[in-house]
Image: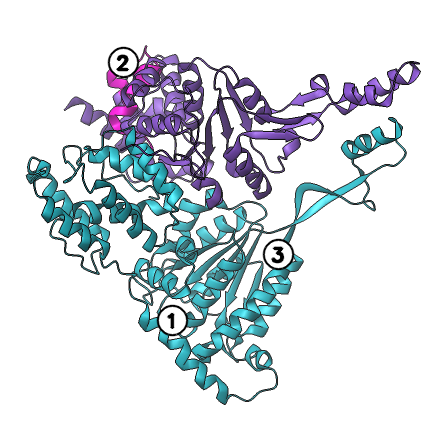
Amino acid sequence: MPVIKPVITGSLKKRRIRIPGKGFRGEVVGFCRVLRRSGMKITSGHIIDLFRSLDNLDITSIEDVYIASKSNLIASQDESAIFEAIFRQYWFDEKGNSNSDAESAEVDSQFEDEGEGDSGEGSSQGEEGDAEAEGQSNENPGLPQEDDSEEGGEPGEAGEEDDGIASYSPSETLSNKDFSSLEINQIAQLRRLIAQLIPKLATKISRRRKPDMRASEVDMRRSVKKSVRTGGEVLQLYRKKRKVQKTQIILICDVSGSMDSYSQFLIQFLYSLQSEIKSLRTFVFSTRLSDATPYLRHKDVNQALKRLALEVHDWSGGTQIGNCLKTFNFEYGRTILNSRTIAIIISDGWDRGDTDLLSEEMDRLRKKCHKLIWLNPLLGSPGYRPIDRGMRTALPYCDEFMSAHNLDSLIVMTNKIAQI
Amino acid sequence: MNLTTNSTKGIKRKKKKTSNFPNVQSVEHSLKKLDYIADKTLSTTLFLSSQLQKPLFLEGEAGVGKTELAKVLAASLDTELIRLQCYEGLDSNSALYEWNYAKQLLHIKMEEGQENSSSQKVERDIFSQDYLIERPLLRALIKSKEKPVVLLIDEIDRSDEEFEAFLLEILSDFQITIPEMGTIKAENKPLVILTSNRTREIHDALKRRCLYLWVDYPSFDKEVEIISTKVPEISTSLAEQITRFMGQARQMDFYKRPGVAETLDWAQALLALEKTQLDEIAVTETIGCILKYQDDIKRINEEEGGLERMVSLSQSSSDS
């Protein structure tokens, strides 16, 4: 189910915030900071509006605080889960322990237990010292995304190695190199190349018109408007034509174990695509499908990957393409697919799931989108034939079946999409 | 807490009387009077939206009552509802204003024959209010002069990004500049409600200017209450059965899960057929009220135990 139930309402009703009055405002600001650190875009404008909201409500009721801050601070239901976890952690974690693997589920159950027992005790207001100390520990709640010093080091080290490679055109050597053997230092170059490819990607005819004198359609609005200059006499017919627009692309990417050798590249690829095409939606799957879009939108690539890795629990696990496509079709397909969408599945087609299901879901997906493209990194390796069960089942539904093992193949793919 | 800087841009805003709601309870109460059952979250957010004069962004599955909320809100404040239905390709000409070109042209032609006409006069004439076609956004600003209206921008996800960007400007300033006439500014800000079915993501910049609310399917009690309010002739036990059945149906893997609108249609249909109990025949006859895809109808019949089980489940719990 895509709907995340607001667990916080109801059971929380009787609880009170520990310190209304002094220090409360500071705590709210602190809370906003934690949210911001977790990747949500929160400006001081939002915080001010939140305070204005709280002015109008009963701040001793945690429910009111919850509703007000949620409606002010989140911009999408996708952020709801993160918000709720942080809200609970910030306002309710009484021991002040901020375990880095305190997943929302864990906090959840912990909270549910407490909710019953000490609803009366919550209104103890005298413990300001206590609360202040807690306020400080809250500043540093040890969210899993905290430290990125490790990650930061890697590109630097790798950069030195880069000097050793003597080549006239680095992009050329790169372009036919198999991704599975790609060094981490070459990924930056790769991203630059991808960024150049993107503008070519995918265009469609928009419903909007733009002025073009060579076009055939007469633009009455402009013609008449301009004719006012000449006293209402239409001397010149202005024309318009339909604008060209970028196509909507959906990426569904396999991150299961069999794709491991490509995944280093894949995540970089997904990230660069996401930052280049704002309307792109990215999904990753192995045994379970998750929407990676909100994670990939994070400004810092390492942070984005960390958060994504946390979300996808079974990264490098097994594959159940049929099942995951089903999730996609039912939870997202109906709303985000339309007759102009190009759906791209990146997978090696090794599937342990039910082939009937796979073919049913492929069929459903095929019907709902404009083009269905399957990228298979294995197709680049000599002697590969798409004969394994999963791939054989899925193949008849694909409009294009292409390899994606190196940059050359990606360029071919990009051109192909541009022609659609 | 009293903060003086109260606009997001830090500009001091004059305190204006815009909202008729003194507190959260009154929102809930006045919506209920108009047969709209709102929960605490919804009424609080609505209250905040009117207090802060911030647009309200409603997102949720189709048929959970997003558009209805705007209608009821307008009725409860006894004010006009101005609706802008979005579609792909919607542009400022059809959202804001447009000159009535044909009328202008006719006027120019008429003036041509007159001896005492001058080009200045003609220009003054044709760029006046009489020749202006007000579209929803402009109308909302003008009508809000006496009393703030409710402006419903429906299904924003259907419009395209150009329009979103344009809306951004309108929603932050609430003023419109018509080059030929000057700037029109809203004396009172209209209450703005944006809805989205989430067929695509709306740009953050727009969402951040709004209060965000995800409208979920109602809880069991709330849905029973909704049925009894909207279809008062129905018996409580049938209403409960319907709700329980819908609850099960929403758990299933349907391509289009039925919303509250479907519940009400169904309740009305069952009432019209003079059914007092849910049974397999009744459900089969009226299944088109709740499921709109052939695949889904097939699925519900193929489900383990099928309709029989679902029907008996929704009945048995009502007996106990």
Q: Which residue is mark 3?
A: A202
Rendered shade, chain B? purple
> What's the amino acid at mark 3?
Ala
B9 shown above or below B147: below
Q: How many marks?
A: 3
Chain under callout 3: A
Residue A223 in picture, x, y percent from top left:
82, 33
For the point 51% across and 14% down, the residue is B146
Tag of residue A258: 1
Mark 3 vs mark 2: in front: 3
B106 shown above or below B57: above
> What's the amino acid at mark 1?
Ser
Chain under callout 1: A
Q: Which residue is mark 2?
A: B235
Q: Does dot 2 land on a helix, a strand or a loop?
A: loop
Residue A320: in magenta span: no
**Same chain, marks 1 and 2?**
no
State if disc 1 and disc 3 touch (CB < 8 Å). no
For the point 50% across and 24% down, the residue is B151
The cyan chain is A
**Residue A7, quarter of the rendered image:** top left
Q: Does dot 1 land on a helix, a strand or a loop?
A: helix
Which stretch did the figure color magenta?
A: B216-239
In the displayed structure image, the side of residue A195 where residue A53 appears, left or right: left
